[in-house]
């Protein structure tokens, strides 16, 4: 506990500066100041998203086994050696299952909140663990990173906004029971948004989950419904928003068609040029690029 406290007592920017010295490696050729994102997979079976610019590469969440993460990185034309750092949204298994092995095997630092590091899968990370906290901007892999609290039944869950040196902005908000003003303020002015659209309320209500689990999912500390996602996207529309990805769909209580049917009308009504995608559980999605 003492060690953890002193670790988090370090200035985040100083830690990031040490990081860039330790990991001044593996810069991808070309790339420019744009931003590229691909969801490697999303759902209760595992979550991970890759974000890169010409200056560096991040994974957000590592909820698949190390081997599966490597396989999915290969499927989008990258390898674990390209990854400069991993950021964790929270400690649930489907977000950090493979992170310990991935970090050790590939010598990659892992950023998480103090609460996240209390999760059982993360206690062994040791010197690979780096601090991250709401309200403390972080520099890693050439990105400026901000995290903000979300409402979910984890110890200190966060959403994440990543900005490239060219000013392109990517935001990810998954596993959130409700839309809080703070989170939605943080998610303004994005080029690419990945947002949870977990369940269709009617499917959840009439589906096979036991009643306590239904209550948990639908609670303000559970998961976001399609209807909430639609209202949430509407509040984040701007001229610059180019991609919206709906993620963490329940395989029991949702379908991609229902999620799209809830959100696409919002984009159409507001004449948004943003393309709408649904992240899949079992295979990576396409690369999305802005400013390339
Ligand atoms: Zn969770
Ligand atoms: Zn989750």
Image (cartoon, grey):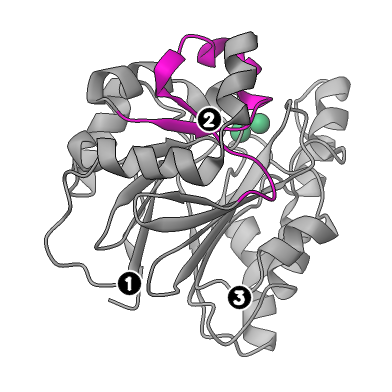
Instruction: Report helix, strand or loop for mark 2.
Output: helix
Q: CA distance from mark 2 to mark 3?
A: 26 Å
From the image, tell me which residue sits under label 1: 34
Quick check: 43 left or right of 280? right
State the residue in front, 227 or 258.
Answer: 227
Which dot, 2 or 3, sits closer to the camera? Answer: 3
Q: Nearer the viewer, residue 227 or 159?
A: 159
Q: Who's the residue at 30% across and 27% down the image?
A: 68
| Label 2 residue near ligand 2, CB within 8 Å | yes
Is residue 149 magenta-colored? no
Write down the quadrant of residue 232 in the picture: bottom right
For this rendering, which residue is in front, 248 or 186? Answer: 186
Read off the residue under disc 3. Answer: 189
User: Percent from the top left, x then y, of residue 98?
Assistant: 40, 21
Return the disc, 1 or 2, that comes first in the chain's sequence: 1
Where's residue 137, x and y in %? 58, 53
For mark 1, give the secondary structure: loop
Disc 3 versus disc 1: distance between alpha carbons? Answer: 15 Å
Range of the magenta residues?
108-136
Question: Do labels 1 and 2 touch, CB within 8 Å?
Answer: no
Instruction: Mark 2: give few (<14), some (14-19) or many (20+) Cα within 10 Å.
Output: many
Q: Residue furthest left?
A: 29
First in sequence, mark 2 or 3: give its number. Answer: 2
**Residue bearing the label numbered 2:** 95
């Amino acid at each position: 506990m003492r060690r953890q406290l002193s670790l988090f007592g370090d200035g985040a920017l100083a830690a990031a500066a040490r990081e860039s010295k330790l990991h001044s490696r593996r810069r991808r050729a070309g790339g420019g100041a744009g931003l590229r994102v691909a969801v490697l997979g999303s759902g209760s079976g595992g979550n991970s998203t890759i974000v890169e610019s010409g200056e560096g590469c991040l994974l957000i969440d590592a909820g698949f086994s190390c081997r599966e993460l490597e396989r999915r990185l290969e499927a989008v034309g990258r390898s674990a050696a390209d990854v400069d750092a991993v950021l964790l949204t929270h400690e649930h298994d489907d977000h950090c299952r493979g992170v310990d092995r991935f970090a050790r095997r590939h010598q990659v630092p892992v950023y998480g909140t103090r609460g996240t590091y209390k999760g059982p899968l993360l206690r062994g990370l040791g010197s690979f663990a780096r601090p991250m906290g709401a309200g403390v901007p972080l520099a890693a892999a050439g990105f400026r990173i901000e995290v903000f609290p979300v409402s979910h039944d984890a110890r200190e869950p966060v959403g994440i906004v990543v900005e490239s040196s060219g000013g392109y902005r990517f935001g990810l908000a998954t596993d959130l029971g409700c839309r809080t003003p703070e989170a939605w303020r943080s998610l303004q002015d994005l080029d690419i948004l990945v947002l949870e659209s977990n369940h269709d309320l009617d499917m959840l209500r009439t589906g096979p989950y036991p009643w306590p689990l239904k209550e948990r999912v639908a609670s303000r500390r559970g998961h976001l419904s399609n209807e909430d996602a639609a209202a949430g996207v509407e509040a984040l529309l701007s001229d610059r928003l180019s991609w919206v990805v709906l993620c963490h769909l329940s395989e029991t209580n949702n379908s991609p068609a229902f999620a799209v049917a809830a959100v696409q009308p919002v984009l159409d009504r507001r004449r948004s040029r943003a393309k709408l995608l649904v992240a899949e559980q079992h295979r990576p999605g396409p690369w999305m690029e802005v400013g390339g």
